[in-house]
Amino acid sequence: MGNPIVHFELVGDDPEALADYYTSLFDWKIDKQPGEMAYWVIDTGQPPMGGIMAKMHPEQTQLDYVLVDSVDESAAKAQELGGMVVVPRTEIEGMGWFAVIVDPQGNGIGVYEEMAGEQQ
């Protein structure tokens, strides 16, 4: 099977409350990560894993990330097919790169490229 979903992100106005909610609902292990950005990592017990973060704008919704061979090629192809890139290629230090595209009907989806030697 090609290009599986490898990560998902939930967003909200109170991400800490969301972490408590999903921990109680599904018994997921959710841990706040150190760093400038408030981000909680979700361990569902099996792939895909996820994250929780504060909304960056009111229209922001959940986002799934698809594993691709090349973020740049996927972003270019999305544009050729009528989509647009709303977050350009961005590095996740020590892990890989991602970009966020919006399809011609307004759905957002992330594309993720692993660094050599990384596996999901």
Image (tube, rainbow, N blue to C red):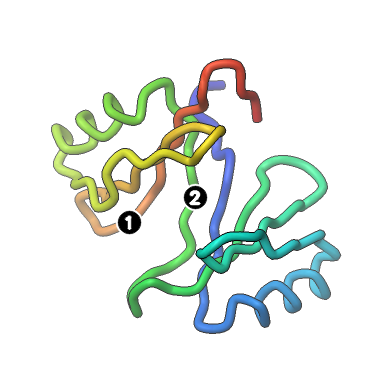
Crowding near the residue tagged with mark 1, few <14, some 14–19, many ≥20 C-alpha atoms within 10 Å: few
Q: Quadrant of residue 48?
A: top right
Identify which residue is drawn at 46% across, 56% down: 63
Residue 107, disc: 1
Q: Nearer the viewer, residue 56 or 58?
A: 56
Amino acid type indicated by mark 2: Asp
Residue 64, disc: 2
Give the residue at the far front of this rendering: 35
Q: Earlier in the sequence, mark 1 or mark 2?
A: 2
Return the x and y of residue 55 as percentages of the image width and height.
44, 74
Residue 115, disc: none
Give the residue at the far top of this rendering: 117
Amino acid type indicated by mark 1: Asn
Q: Nearer the viewer, residue 35 or 101?
A: 35
Identify which residue is drawn at 70% across, 56% down: 42
Return the x and y of residue 6 as percentages of the image width and height.
58, 39
Does dot 2 land on a helix, a strand or a loop?
Answer: strand
Identify which residue is drawn at 49% across, 32% down: 96
Identify which residue is drawn at 56% across, 52% down: 8
Return the x and y of residue 75 as percentages of the image width and height.
26, 34
Return the x and y of residue 11 as percentages of the image width and height.
51, 70
Does 45 sit left or right of 89 as displayed? Answer: right
Q: Disc 1 and disc 2: Cα gap in Å?
A: 11 Å
Q: Quadrant of the C terminus?
A: top right
Does dot 1 land on a helix, a strand or a loop?
Answer: loop
Does 119 sit left or right of 93 as displayed? Answer: right
Q: Quadrant of the N terminus?
A: top right
Does 100 sit left or right of 40 as displayed? Answer: left
Q: Nearer the viewer, residue 62 or 1?
A: 62
